Image (cartoon, rainbow, N blue to C red):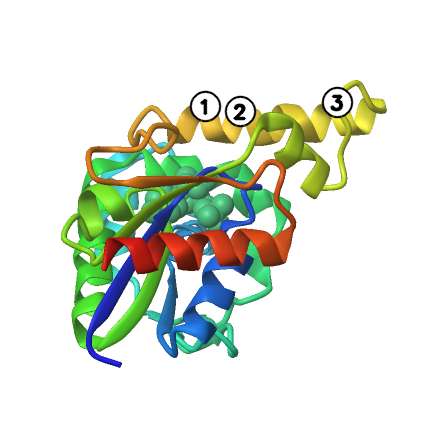
Amino acid sequence: NGRIVVAIDGPSGSGKSSVSKAVARTLNAAYLDTGAMYRAITFSVLAEGADLNDAAAVAQAVRDAQLQISVDPDAELVQIAGQDVTQAIREPRISENVSAVATNLEARAELVRRQQEIIAANERIVAEGRDITTVVAPDADARILLTASEEARLRRRGLQLGGTQNDAQLEAQVLARDAKDSTVVNFTEAADGVMTVDSSDLDFEQTIAAVLDAVQAAK
Ligand code: C5P
């Protein structure tokens, strides 16, 4: 039970968040959802009525943001200036706009800095996102890329390839967000020393077991 940092990256719909939380519980570690931080900043910029396309305004919003995030894997809580935004940051309007924050390099630098502070402050922690294995915690004890085929990712979202009009629209949104995200971070290929866990043909419990095996192998 000494210090351990586990870094997990992957695209949306890879089951990253629920798997990372479960892994954190098993390892008796804290859990950091870095995507929630990008979402919270997006919420805050929209709430202020600032222009998400104004790079300087977005960068300023990140510097000013009084962002608080719980690292308890059993108590999800995200606050902006004391306001509970845990549910609000999951709304479609946030997912649709979050790339404006994610592609802003000054915003990223500030969020990476805060994420590194949180990781340093916790003896044992599992941190997940898109750039944890490469930028935020390249020295982590275990670095894992959690992937899943496009088909598996859509299936987990309750969608089907070649499904209804609505499915097709949601599918297009998920793929468009990943495409935008991948312009700043490469989270589809494992960097040097990063282990890949492909969850396409694994159920939830099997995926957790595979990630824990990877952590064990890395130590
Ligand atoms: O993981 P989640 O889907 O909640 O992340 C929301 C968005 O935050 C991603 O689509 C991406 O634009 C951004 N993000 C990021 N780097 C991270 C985590 C999330 O750019 N480490």
Q: Which residue is mark 2?
A: 176
The residue mark sitting in front, 2 or 3, is 3
* Residue found at x 53% / y 46%: 94
Q: Which mark sits nearer the N-terminus, 3 or 1?
A: 3
Q: On the rendered structure, is 92 left or right of 16? A: right
Q: On the rendered structure, is 154 left or right of 53? A: right
Quarter of the image where one finds residue 88: bottom right
Q: Residues within 10 Å of mark 1 (few under 14, many from 20)?
A: few
The picture quadrant for ligand 1 comes to: top left
Q: Secondary structure at mark 1?
A: helix
Query: Which residue is nearer to you in this view: 50 or 209?
Result: 209
Cα gap from disc 3 to disc 1, whole angstroms = 18 Å
* Residue found at x 21% / y 58%: 141
Q: Which dot marks residue 179?
A: 1
Give x and y (percent) for residue 186: 31, 29
Give x and y (percent) for residue 93: 59, 44
Q: Which mark sits nearer the N-terminus, 2 or 3?
A: 3
At label 2, the amino acid type is Ala
Q: Which residue is mark 3?
A: 161
Q: Residues within 10 Å of mark 3 (few under 14, many from 20)?
A: few
At label 3, the amino acid type is Leu
Give x and y (percent) for residue 69: 38, 71
Q: Are marks 2 and 3 in contact (CB under 8 Å)?
A: no
Q: Are marks 3 and 1 in contact (CB under 8 Å)?
A: no
Query: Which residue is nearer to you in this view: 58 or 71?
Result: 71
Query: Which residue is nearer to you in this view: 21 or 98?
Result: 21
Q: On the rendered structure, is 51 left or right of 218? A: right
